[in-house]
């Protein structure tokens, strides 16, 4: 999903889960675990109310996006 969107466009992790299964809620821990790994690898950024957060420690709803060129250069 991240690759299909412009770097500045965000998406909810639940969008990924909903594409995978009608019982999407059960997939959310796995989706967030994978997102945390991709974030650690510099392939995703996560935000909460517009502020960057760590997927692994964020509580509540988050948004995911591809890093901008500026984010990638910082890594």
Image (cartoon, rainbow, N blue to C red):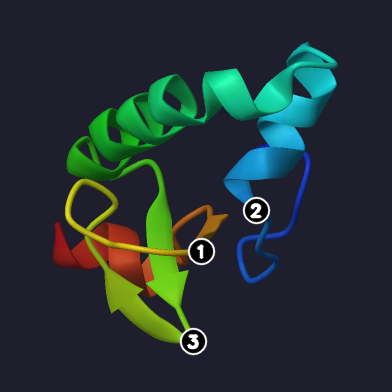
CA gap between label 2 and label 3 equals 12 Å
Report which residue position mark 3 lands on.
49
Asked if disc 1 and disc 2 are in contact, CB closer than 8 Å, the reply is: yes
The residue most toward the bottom is: 50
The residue that appears at 30% across and 58% down in the rendered structure is 72
Dot 1 falls on a residue whose secondary structure is loop
Q: Which is nearer the N-term, disc 2 or disc 3?
A: 2
Q: Position of residue 68 (x, y in %)?
A: 47, 66
Report which residue position mark 1 lands on.
61
* Label 1 CA crowd tier, 10 Å (few <14, some 14–19, many 20+): few
The residue that appears at 79% across and 12% down in the rendered structure is 21
* Residue 2 seen by the camera: no
Dot 3 falls on a residue whose secondary structure is loop
* Label 3 CA crowd tier, 10 Å (few <14, some 14–19, many 20+): few
Q: Position of residue 67 (x, y in %)?
A: 44, 59
The residue that appears at 25% across and 30% down in the rendered structure is 37
Q: Position of residue 6 (x, y in %)?
A: 72, 59
Left or right: 29 as drawn, with respect to 41: right
Q: Nearer the viewer, mark 1 or mark 3?
A: 1
Asked if disc 2 and disc 3 are in contact, CB closer than 8 Å, the reply is: no
CA gap between label 1 and label 2 equals 8 Å
């Amino acid at each position: 999903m991240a690759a299909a969107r412009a770097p500045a466009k965000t998406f909810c992790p639940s969008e990924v889960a909903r594409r995978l299964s009608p019982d999407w809620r059960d997939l959310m821990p796995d989706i967030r675990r994978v997102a945390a790994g991709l974030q650690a690898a510099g392939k995703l950024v996560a935000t909460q109310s517009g502020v960057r957060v760590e997927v692994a420690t964020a509580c509540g709803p988050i948004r995911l996006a591809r890093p901008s060129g500026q984010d990638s250069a910082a890594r």
